[in-house]
Image: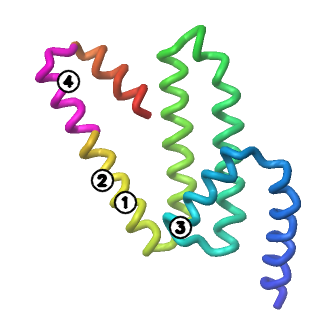
């Protein structure tokens, strides 16, 4: 009973604070909810993850003009940290979906590297393209 009441208040608080959330956070959580079929508790946790991701990306935005490579490295770090946190939120079945998505991403990355090598791109160009990809 206590857990149900806690979840109710968390959801109520989430609804109230949803009015203050950005459209990007709302969209990201909706996509995650649809992709992983999240429970109410997981949705609340996902809002925290997505808000943190948005805040971190805003903090590094100043680097985009001054040090583009560092900006991309930090952006990639934000993505990896968010994925790790999301992995902790998900249950075993949901992690299976995440693992499949990550395997697809890694395969696409491998294909991109091979294509760029065939096109005669330098190691630095390949690294930059991978950072830009995320």
**Dots 4, 2 in contact, CB < 8 A:** no
Mark nearer the N terminus (4 vs 2): 2
Q: Is residue 68 above or below residue 42?
A: above
Badge 2 is on which residue?
A: 103
89 sits to left or right of 1:
left
What are the residue bounds of the magenta stretch?
109-121
Query: Which element is circle 1 on?
Result: helix
Residue 32: image location, x then y, percent? 55, 60
Residue 108: image location, x then y, percent? 27, 42
Query: Which element is circle 3 on?
Result: loop
In the rendered view of the protein, which quadrant contains the N terminus?
A: bottom right
Badge 1 is on which residue?
A: 99
107 sits to left or right of 65:
left
**Dots 1, 2 in contact, CB < 8 A:** yes
**Dots 3, 4 in contact, CB < 8 A:** no
Q: Residues within 10 Å of mark 4 (few under 14, many from 20)?
A: some
Q: Residues within 10 Å of mark 1 (few under 14, many from 20)?
A: few
Badge 3 is on which residue?
A: 90
Residue 19: image location, x then y, percent? 84, 53
Labels in figure, total: 4
Badge 4 is on which residue?
A: 116
Between circles 4 and 1, the one closer to the viewer is 4
Q: CA distance from mark 4 to mark 1?
A: 26 Å
In the rendered view of the protein, which quadrant contains the C terminus?
A: top left
Name the residue at the left extreme. Answer: 118
Q: Quadrant of residue 126?
A: top left
Q: Residue 83 colored magenta?
A: no
Mark nearer the N terminus (2 vs 3): 3
Q: Residues within 10 Å of mark 3 (few under 14, many from 20)?
A: some
Chief SS of the magenta region:
helix
Q: Residues within 10 Å of mark 2 (few under 14, many from 20)?
A: few
Mark nearer the N terminus (4 vs 1): 1
């Amino acid at each position: 009973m206590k857990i149900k009441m806690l979840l109710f208040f968390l959801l109520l608080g989430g609804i109230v604070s949803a009015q203050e959330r950005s459209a990007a956070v709302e969209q990201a959580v909706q996509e995650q909810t649809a992709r992983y079929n999240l429970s109410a508790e997981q949705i609340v946790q996902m809002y925290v993850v997505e808000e943190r991701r948005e805040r971190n990306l805003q903090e590094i935005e100043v680097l985009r003009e001054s040090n583009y490579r560092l900006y991309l490295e930090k952006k990639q770090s934000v993505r990896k940290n968010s994925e790790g946190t999301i992995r902790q939120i998900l249950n075993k079945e949901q992690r299976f979906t995440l693992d499949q998505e990550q395997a697809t991403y890694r395969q696409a990355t491998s294909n991109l590297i091979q294509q760029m090598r065939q096109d005669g791109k330098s190691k630095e160009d390949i690294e930059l393209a991978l950072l830009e990809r995320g």
